[in-house]
Structures are given as C-alpha cells and as structure tokens.
C-alpha cells in the first residue's frame, strides 16, 4: 500500500497528477460559504468530460436555502428507514446529526444522468456522468475545495426525485458534498503495479 499524494496547499498551482493523487474525500468541512462563481468555474471545466456521441447526459442540481434544508430532511428520514429501531431515543441524536451536518455542508450538488432508451447509451451516459462528477471533484480540489461523493439508495428516493422535479428519464447518480476542508484524511492505495497486467 502507498500513502496518498501531496495534500492541499491553498492558492498554489497544482499539476493534474498532484490533484489526482492528493484529492481526498473530505467529510469535515469549514462552514465558510463557497462562491457560486467558483462552483460554476469548476462545473464549466467538468462538462468537458468525454462522452460517447457527445450526448452531454449530465445535469447538476445545486441545492441552496430551502432546497438544502429539504434535502437534509429527506436524508435524515431516509437514514431512519435503515435503522432497526428508528424511534428509540438513543438513535435520535445520530439522526439529528445527519440533518445538521447536511444543512451545514456549504455546497450540495445532485449529479444526474439522462437515461437514454438505448441500453448501451444509457450505460455509457452514466459512466460519463460519473466522469463529470470526478472531474468536478478534481477541479474543486485544485481550487482549494474538498468534496465527498455519496451514493446509496437515497439516489432513487421518490422524495428526492420530487425535490429535484426529475423527469422519468433522468436519474441521480450521486450527491457531491463540497466545501473548504477543515480536515483532510490520509488514505492508502495499492500500488498500480499490483493492479496492472502487461501483455506482450
Ligand atoms: C461511485 C462512488 C460512490 C461512493 N459512495 C459513497 C457513499 O455512499 N458513502 C461514502 O461514505 N462514501 C462514498 N464514496 C466515497 C468513497 O468512500 C471514497 O472515495 C473512498 O473511501 C476513498 O477515499 P478517497 O476518495 O479519499 O481516496 C463513493 C465513491 C465513489 C467513487
């Protein structure tokens, strides 16, 4: 296993390789607001992600104000459904924490993909949309922002779909949480040599 790459140094120029190696999923973020212009700058780069037949399948929903509050409620209520005993007094603080921490996350972006009728296009569009989400995460990192990509069955929750007013042919592929990092975790990876086969 190897340690992660360089850690964030705000304001410094960062190579693509440094961004790829150094980016971490950041759970603890500062409450400082993130300018809309910065989010748009990074999204404007992310839409250059490759996508077959240039279908541009992504649509990003940035949740602010009442939408973020509602999302926090939906996320908390979804978490309740995963608990064996959701009404027990001892689990209430954990549920409240889900609500509060979501509300306090500076930026929440629901990343959605178009669902084409053709199964091959549908699959490739979802890959491409994750590519765009990852491009956003890397771009955000290079601009001093931390991100956390979250998935799970909440993606298909009807309340979330309703909040986003998603049509039938669009699906949430993940939710990106973003903000200035308060703490950057250390993680490890298996060296690529152990995951690579050279065939001659
Ligand atoms: C497709 C995908 C789905 C993920 N879903 C979740 C999730 O639902 N919950 C979570 O805590 N982390 C989720 N993550 C983040 C991973 O846990 C994280 O990338 C991993 O721990 C490695 O950490 P690093 O990103 O700092 O290298 C997801 C990442 C990817 C790529």
Image (tube, grey):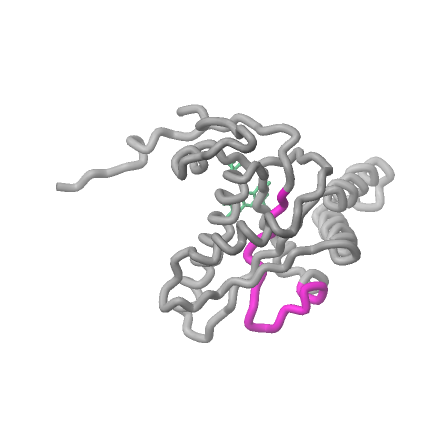
Quadrant of the rendering where the C terminus is positioned:
top left
Quarter assignment of residue 163: bottom right
Give 47 or 3, whichever is nearer the viewer.
47
Please provide percent x and percent y for residue 162. Answer: 70, 67
- Inspect the magenta stretch and tell me whether residue 125 lies in it: no
Count of numbered labels shown in the rendering:
0
Q: Image point 46% across, 65% down: which residue? A: 56
Position of residue 154 measured from the top left corner of the image (x, y, whole percent): 65, 54
Left/right of residue 54 with respect to residue 95 in the rendered view: left
168 inside magenta stretch: yes
The residue located at (46%, 34%) in the rendering is: 13
Residue 36's spot in the image, x, y percent?
65, 51
Q: Residue at x 53, y 26 (%)?
A: 186
Q: Which residue: 64% across, 40% down?
A: 179
Q: Nearer the viewer, residue 158 or 13?
A: 13
- Position of residue 146 relative to residue 41, above or below, is above
Q: Which residues are magenta?
A: 161-178
Quadrant hosting ligand 1: top right
On screen, residue 95 versus residue 21, left or right, reads right
Q: Quadrant of residue 32?
A: top right
Quarter of the image with the N terminus is: top left
Nearer to the camera, 111 or 141: 141
Up the image or down, 108 lies above or below 197; here it is below
Spot the residue most to the left: 200
Q: Position of residue 38 (x, y in %)?
A: 60, 48
- Outermost residue on the right side: it is 89
């Amino acid at each position: 296993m190897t340690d992660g790459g360089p850690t964030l140094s705000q304001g410094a120029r960062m190579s693509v390789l440094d961004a790829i190696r150094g980016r971490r999923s950041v759970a603890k973020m500062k409450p400082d607001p993130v300018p809309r212009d910065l989010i748009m700058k990074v999204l404007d780069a992310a839409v250059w992600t490759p996508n077959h037949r240039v279908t541009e399948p992504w649509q990003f929903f940035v949740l602010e104000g009442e939408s973020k509050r509602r999302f926090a409620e939906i996320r908390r209520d979804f978490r309740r459904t995963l608990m064996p005993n959701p009404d027990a007094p001892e689990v209430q603080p954990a549920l409240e924490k889900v609500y509060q921490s979501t509300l306090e996350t500076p930026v929440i972006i629901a990343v959605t993909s178009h669902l084409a009728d053709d199964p091959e296009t549908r699959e490739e569009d979802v890959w491409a949309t994750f590519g765009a989400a990852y491009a956003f995460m890397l771009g955000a990192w290079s601009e001093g922002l931390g991100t956390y990509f979250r998935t799970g069955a909440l993606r298909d929750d009807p309340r979330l779909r309703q909040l986003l007013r998603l049509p039938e042919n669009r699906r949430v592929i993940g939710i990106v949480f973003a903000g200035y990092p308060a703490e950057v975790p250390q993680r490890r990876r298996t060296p690529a040599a152990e995951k690579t086969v050279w065939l001659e």
